[in-house]
Every structure is written in structure tokens, then in C-alpha cells.
């Protein structure tokens, strides 16, 4: 996927990328045609309203990557922290991915591929810290005491925060949009009810809820800050900034004391490699591209689908049973996603 080519042109507003086609100049034929909305005797046909533009195939492909790959990362994170410290493992993931992506850009485009302004660099660093340190880093920390499936269920609160943030930003949510969010949360409640019956550490749950707030905030401000025009360069700087912040937090927390690299299991190394290649290089870049080219409420639906993917992977890989609440909750979640998607193509109301 060539993300930079799909980016909006300079000067385009956020509304130019919300799935609506910009009206072009009228053709001579259309100018000469009679008015379709005329109510005179000559008008025998009802008015023909233009259809909303369909979302591009690239948007659906990027959504599929974020849906499936990020749904699997909760399991990978859970395996990686079995023998790795939380923030230092997150730092290794994002610093490695950021350096690999930067090297790819240098080979492909030379220094121009990474050239950005000071404001764009600062914006990328801020978004990277919010998403990858406050968001992902706290999820990694929380998964030391919270099962991966439950962590994915908690992260599904992100769309609710996003709808509230866009409302504060001046965009009035549609009733169907709010209904889709509430329906999705009801489904997630059905999914998570059996999990809360066990012995869950309250502090880990609180940490993951805080992660959802910072992730939603980072996603929100990324659409309002001057970001680099090259999406791959923006992703590289975000991962480097987030990785450095994770490293600093890990060192402050004392995670380096007593760390024995030789004691890290092969399972954890494999999980970390998967997180670098698929969770960061592939899925995070797809997510950064979606933030520019798709409605925010549509992008946020990944948080509904990820828990379903996490539950299915637990069933396939760990032989976890598929219970009635799991199936019912998954169906409600999918219904909520469909409702949000159905209204995401229309322009937002101010």
C-alpha cells in the first residue's frame, strides 16, 4: 500500500477525506439539461438525489489489517511480558520498528523521505507519545495482571471517548452514531461479564482504562496538528518518539535492574518480533493512514472488532471455550460496527 499517494492534497480540510466526493465543475451537458427539481408541468420525474461516495478499497483494506492484526497483538503482548519488562519491551518494539521504517524511507527516497518541518516533527512526537507510551505502553503494563482478552474488551471504550472528543471539537454526533457506540458497548459488556466474575486486579483495569483515554486523545489531535505529508515518515517519527518515551519510563521504573536477556524465553522473542513486523510496521502505519483518509468514527470501530478477534484467537490457539455470552456479545458488537459504518460516509454536522 502506497500510503503517501493516498494522502489528501495540501490545504485539504478534514472534511475532504470523510468519504464524501467533492463536487466538480458542471459540464456543458449538465448545464444545458433541465432542472431536475423543477415543479412545473414539464417535470414528470421525481428529483434524483446524488448518492454518497463509496469508501475506497484502500480504506477497507487498511481497516481489515487494523481489525485482524491488532486483534492478535493482545495475545502477543501477553506472551512477550511473560519474561520481558513492560515498558522496556514496548521500547524495543517501537524503536526497532521506527528504525526499520526510517531505513526503508532512506533507501527508497533518500534524506528527502524523512525531511519534515520543526512543527511537523513536534506534532509527530506528541502524537507518538500519546499513542505509544500513554496508550500502548499502559496496555502492556496492564496486561501483566489482566488477561489479553479482557484487555481488548476494555480498549473498546476508545470509540466512546472519540465521539465525545469530536463533539467537543464542534462536530455534533448523529443519533445513529451514538446509538452504534452504545450498542457496541452493550455487546462488549455482554462479552466481558463472565471475565469480571474471576479474580481480576483492579489496578490493571484502571491502567488500561487510562490507556484508552490517552489513545483516543492522540488519535483526536493527530487530525488537528500539522503532520508530515508522508504518512510513512509520520509513522516512523511517532514510533521513535513513543519508543524513546517508553525507554525513559522503563528506566525510571527500574525495569533494567536485574534484567537478564538470556532468561527471556523464545516465546517472548517470537511475540516481540511479531509485534514489530505486523503490529507496528504494518498495522500502525495502516492506522496512521486511516486517520487521514477515513472518518474518525469509522476508524475507531477497530476497537469493537479487536476484542472479537482476540476471543477467537483464544479459542483457536489456547482452546478457550466459546460460550453463549461470547457469541451473543460478538453479534451485538458487529451490529454496532455496522451502524457506525452506515453513517460515517455522510458529512458531519457543525
Image: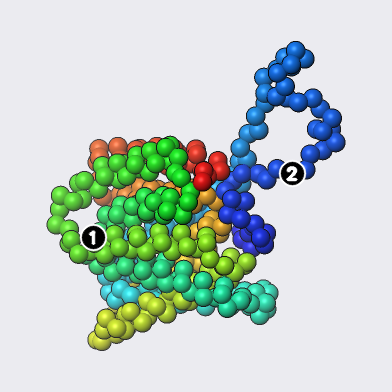
Task: Write down the quadrant of residue 111 in the picture.
Answer: bottom right
Query: Where 259 falls versus 17 (above or below)?
Result: below
Q: Is residue 279 above or below residue 160?
A: below
> Residue at the spot x=54%, y=56% of the render?
290
Which label is found at residue 24? Answer: 2
Label 1 environment density (alpha carbons within 10 Å; few <14, some 14–19, many ≥20): some
The 10 Å Cα crowd at callout 2, few under 14, some 14 to 19, many 20 or more, is few
> How much space separates mark 2 and mark 1, taking CA atoms?
50 Å
Q: Position of residue 23 (x, y in %)?
A: 70, 43
- Can residue 324 be seen by looking at this rendering? yes
Residue 291, horizontal then vertical, whole percent: 52, 57
**Nearer to us in this view, 142 or 322:** 142
Q: Could one spot residue 271 in this view of the protein?
A: no
Judge from the rendering whether residue 345 lies leftward or rightward of residue 22; answer left or right: left
Q: How is the image coloured?
A: rainbow
Residue 6, how many percent across, how many down? 64, 57
Residue at (67, 26) in percent of width and height: 48
**Residue closer to the observer: 168 or 180:** 168
Q: Residue 205, which numbered label?
A: 1
Residue reaching furthest to the bottom: 257
Against 127, residue 43 (above or below) is above
Residue drawn at (56%, 57%) of the image: 292
Q: Nearer the viewer, residue 236 or 158?
A: 158
* Rendering coords of residue 40 (x, y %): 74, 16
Amino acid at each position: 500500500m502506497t500510503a503517501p499517494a493516498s494522502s489528501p492534497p495540501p490545504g485539504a480540510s478534514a472534511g475532504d477525506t470523510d468519504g464524501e466526493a467533492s463536487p466538480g465543475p458542471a459540464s456543458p451537458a449538465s448545464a444545458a439539461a433541465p432542472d431536475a427539481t423543477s415543479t412545473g408541468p414539464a417535470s414528470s420525474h421525481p428529483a434524483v438525489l446524488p448518492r454518497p461516495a463509496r469508501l475506497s478499497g484502500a480504506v477497507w483494506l487498511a481497516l481489515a489489517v487494523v481489525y485482524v492484526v491488532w486483534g492478535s497483538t493482545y495475545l502477543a503482548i501477553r506472551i512477550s511480558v511473560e519474561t520481558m519488562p513492560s515498558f522496556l519491551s514496548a521500547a524495543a518494539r517501537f524503536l526497532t520498528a521506527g528504525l526499520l521504517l526510517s531505513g526503508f524511507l532512506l533507501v527508497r527516497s533518500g534524506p528527502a523521505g524523512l525531511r519534515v518541518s520543526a512543527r511537523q516533527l513536534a506534532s509527530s512526537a506528541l502524537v507518538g507519545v500519546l499513542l505509544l507510551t500513554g496508550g500502548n505502553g499502559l496496555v502492556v503494563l496492564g496486561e501483566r495482571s489482566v488477561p489479553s482478552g479482557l484487555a481488548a474488551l476494555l480498549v473498546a471504550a476508545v470509540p466512546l471517548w472519540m465521539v465525545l472528543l469530536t463533539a467537543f471539537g464542534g462536530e455534533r454526533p448523529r443519533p445513529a452514531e451514538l446509538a452504534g457506540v452504545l450498542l457496541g458497548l452493550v455487546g462488549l459488556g455482554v462479552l466481558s461479564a463472565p471475565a469480571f466474575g474471576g479474580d481480576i486486579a483492579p489496578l490493571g483495569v484502571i491502567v488500561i482504562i487510562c490507556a484508552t483515554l490517552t489513545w483516543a486523545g492522540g488519535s483526536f489531535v493527530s487530525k488537528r496538528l500539522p503532520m508530515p505529508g508522508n504518512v510513512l515518515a509520520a509513522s516512523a517519527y511517532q514510533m521513535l518518539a513513543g519508543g524513546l518515551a517508553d525507554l525513559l519510563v522503563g528506566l525510571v521504573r527500574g525495569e533494567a535492574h536485574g534484567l537478564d536477556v538470556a532468561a527471556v524465553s523464545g516465546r517472548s522473542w517470537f511475540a516481540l518480533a511479531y509485534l514489530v513486523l505486523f503490529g507496528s510496521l504494518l498495522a500502525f502505519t495502516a492506522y496512521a493512514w486511516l486517520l487521514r483518509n477515513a472518518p474518525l468514527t469509522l476508524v475507531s470501530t477497530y476497537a469493537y472488532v479487536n476484542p472479537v478477534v482476540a476471543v477467537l484467537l483464544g479459542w483457536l490457539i489456547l482452546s478457550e471455550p466459546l460460550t453463549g455470552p461470547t457469541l451473543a456479545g460478538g453479534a451485538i458488537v458487529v451490529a454496532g460496527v455496522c451502524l457506525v459504518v452506515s453513517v460515517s460516509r455522510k458529512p458531519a454536522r457543525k
